[in-house]
C-alpha cells in the first residue's frame, strides 16, 4: 500500500520540509510551572503533554480548546475534554489537570488559560506550550503577545515529517495546515494577535510556491 507521505510530489515535499523545519522552535525541554496543551485535531498533543508531565517537567497541566470545524466530529465533547481523557488513560492524575473548554483559536487558548490560572491563584512565570509540531512558532508568537512576561518552551511529539503525515493519515490536510500556519506567521502580527517573527526568504518562497499549486484551504482571507 502506498503511504500518504510517499504520494507527495518531490517538488512539494521539498518546500514542505522547509516549512516544517521553520515552524519547529528547536527548544530543549526544561522544567516549567505549567504545561499547556493547545487544542487541535491532533491527539498527539495530549500524548506529548502526558509524557512530559510524567517526566517531571511540570506539576500541572491545562488543556485548552473548544471545537473548530476540523475537530467537531473527532472530538464532539470538545478538544480539551478529550485531551484530558487521553492524558488520564496514560496515567496523569485527574487532580493535576485543569480544563479550559471555551477557546476557539490560539489567542483565546493563551488568554483564557491565563484567566483560569489567575482565578485559581496559580502563579506562573514559565510555561511549556505543547502543540502540533508545525504550530510551535505560531504558539510562541501568540503567547509572547498575550503573556509576554513568562518564559516559554515549545514542545511537540518528536516525529519526523514523514512519520507525522502517516500518523495523521491525510497528506493534503497536513500540507494545507502547514501552509495556513505559515500565512498566520506573516499576517497575525498586523492585527496584534502575535509578535512578528523573522521569516527567511527561502521559507517565504517555499510558502508561495505551495500556495501557487493550490494548497489554500487553510488560508485566512
Image (spheres, helix red, strand yellow):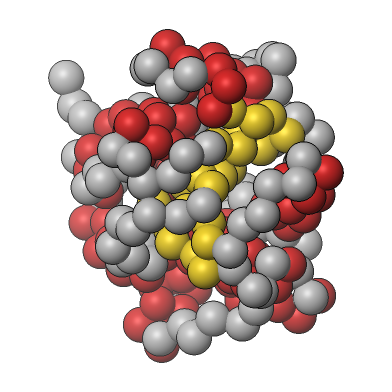
Q: Nearer the viewer, residue 58 or 216?
A: 58
- Residue lying at 44% horizontally and 44% vertically, measured from the top left: 58
Q: Is residue 219 above or below residue 80?
A: below
Q: Position of residue 30 (x, y in %)?
A: 34, 58
- Residue lying at 49% horizontally and 73% vertically, measured from the top left: 208
Q: Is residue 151 above or below residue 115?
A: below
Q: Position of residue 192 (x, y in %)?
A: 79, 75
- Residue 7 quadrant: top left
- Residue 104 quadrant: top right
Q: Is residue 44 above or below residue 9?
A: above
Q: Position of residue 180 (x, y in %)?
A: 57, 57
Q: Nearer the viewer, residue 211 or 98?
A: 98
Q: Is residue 8 above or below residue 184?
A: above
Residue 47, visible in the rendered structure: yes
Q: Residue furthest top?
A: 89
Task: Report the quarter where the N terminus lies.
Answer: top left
- Residue 111 quadrant: bottom right
Q: Is residue 122 left or right of residue 24?
A: right
- Residue lying at 42% horizontally and 12% vertically, measured from the top left: 89
Label tally: 0
Q: Nearer the viewer, residue 84 or 192?
A: 84
Task: Report the quarter where the C terminus lies.
Answer: bottom right
- Residue lying at 70% horizontally and 77% vertically, measured from the top left: 189
Q: Position of residue 154 (x, y in %)?
A: 43, 58
Residue 70, visible in the rendered structure: no
Q: Is residue 123 left or right of residue 13?
A: right
Q: Residue furthest left?
A: 1
Amino acid at each position: 500500500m502506498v503511504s500518504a507521505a510517499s504520494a507527495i510530489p518531490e517538488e512539494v515535499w521539498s518546500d514542505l520540509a522547509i516549512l516544517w523545519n521553520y515552524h519547529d522552535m528547536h527548544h530543549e525541554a526544561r522544567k516549567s510551572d505549567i504545561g499547556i496543551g493547545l487544542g487541535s485535531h491532533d491527539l498527539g498533543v495530549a500524548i506529548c503533554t502526558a509524557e512530559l508531565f510524567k517526566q517531571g517537567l511540570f506539576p500541572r497541566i491545562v488543556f485548552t480548546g473548544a471545537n473548530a470545524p476540523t475537530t467537531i466530529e473527532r472530538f464532539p465533547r470538545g478538544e480539551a475534554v478529550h485531551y484530558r481523557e487521553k492524558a488520564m488513560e496514560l496515567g496523569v492524575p485527574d487532580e493535576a489537570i485543569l480544563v479550559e473548554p471555551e477557546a476557539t483559536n490560539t489567542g483565546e487558548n493563551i488568554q483564557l488559560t491565563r484567566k483560569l490560572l489567575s482565578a485559581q491563584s496559580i502563579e506562573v512565570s514559565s510555561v511549556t506550550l505543547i502543540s502540533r509540531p508545525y504550530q510551535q512558532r505560531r504558539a510562541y508568537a501568540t503567547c509572547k503577545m498575550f503573556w509576554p512576561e513568562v518564559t516559554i518552551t515549545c514542545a511537540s511529539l518528536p516525529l519526523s515529517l514523514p512519520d507525522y503525515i502517516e500518523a495523521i493519515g491525510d497528506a493534503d490536510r497536513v500540507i494545507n495546515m502547514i501552509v495556513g500556519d505559515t500565512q498566520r506567521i506573516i499576517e497575525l502580527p498586523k492585527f496584534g494577535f502575535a509578535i512578528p517573527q523573522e521569516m527567511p526568504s527561502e521559507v517565504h518562497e517555499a510558502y508561495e510556491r505551495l500556495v501557487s499549486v493550490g494548497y489554500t484551504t487553510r488560508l485566512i482571507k
